[in-house]
Image (cartoon, rainbow, N blue to C red):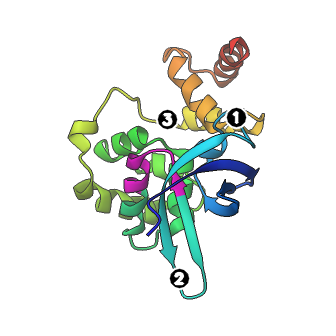
Amino acid sequence: MIASLRGTVSHLGKTDLIVEVGGVGVRVAVPKTVLENPGGVGRTIFLHTQLLVRENELALFGFASEEDLALFLVLLDVNGVGPKVALAILSTLSPELLKNAILREEASVLQRVPGIGKKTAERIMFHLRDKLDLHAAASPVPFLTDADGELIDLLTSLGFSIVEAQSVLQKLPREVTAIDERVQLALQYLDRG
């Protein structure tokens, strides 16, 4: 019904934003990666959208890419995964990281997403294994270890975005394993901008 949306961001919430389109403010639930995109209120935004119709509500979900939207729709097909959990997955994991976790059968990567336990993570992996083109997407993105997850949690608690934390994680040398050294190096990279 509503395939895309282009307008001006008039409000940023914790899990959604309001896009002004022709004098009408449209509330759109989005992953954190969209909310953390530079520019903030007043910027022009383009989103690929999906309208979900429930008994008592209409909810519009927006994504920066068609790949994110397609992944969201596939996640909704998994038993026990609703729109909030699907958004949490896309807010925490990049599509590449998710696909690599499924390819490597690393359920622990999915368990780092708030609201996902072991059974749900395994169900998601089982369901997505046949739905996604994993071999074409397999890239040299390293899987997320417990130390990586801890570093991302620390950096986001310090106010850095998930996108910033994940990108700085890619720059850290793998031979540095002590968490205090990793945090120090990450902060140096982030300080350089």
Residue position marked by numbered label 3 in the rendering: 145
Looking at the image, tell me whether mark 1 or mark 3 is earlier in sequence order. 1
**Residue 50 percent location from the top left of the image:** 47, 64
Q: Residue at x 27, y 51 (%)?
A: 132
Marks 1/3: CA distance? 32 Å
**Residue 178 percent location from the top left of the image:** 62, 21
Which range of residues does the magenta coloring cover?
A: 62-71
Q: Please identify the dominant SS of the magenta region.
A: helix
Looking at the image, tell me whether mark 2 or mark 3 is earlier in sequence order. 2
Residue position marked by numbered label 1 in the rendering: 39
As rendered, which of 11 and 6 lies closer to the eye? 6
Q: Residue at x 51, y 14 (%)?
A: 173
13 horizontally vs 66: left or right: right
Whether residue 116 can be seen here: no
Q: Mark 3: which secondary structure?
A: loop
Q: Quadrant of residue 24?
A: bottom right
Query: Depth-wise, is mark 1 or mark 3 nearer the camera?
Result: 1
Label 2: few (<14), some (14–19) or many (≥20) C-alpha neighbours in 10 Å? few
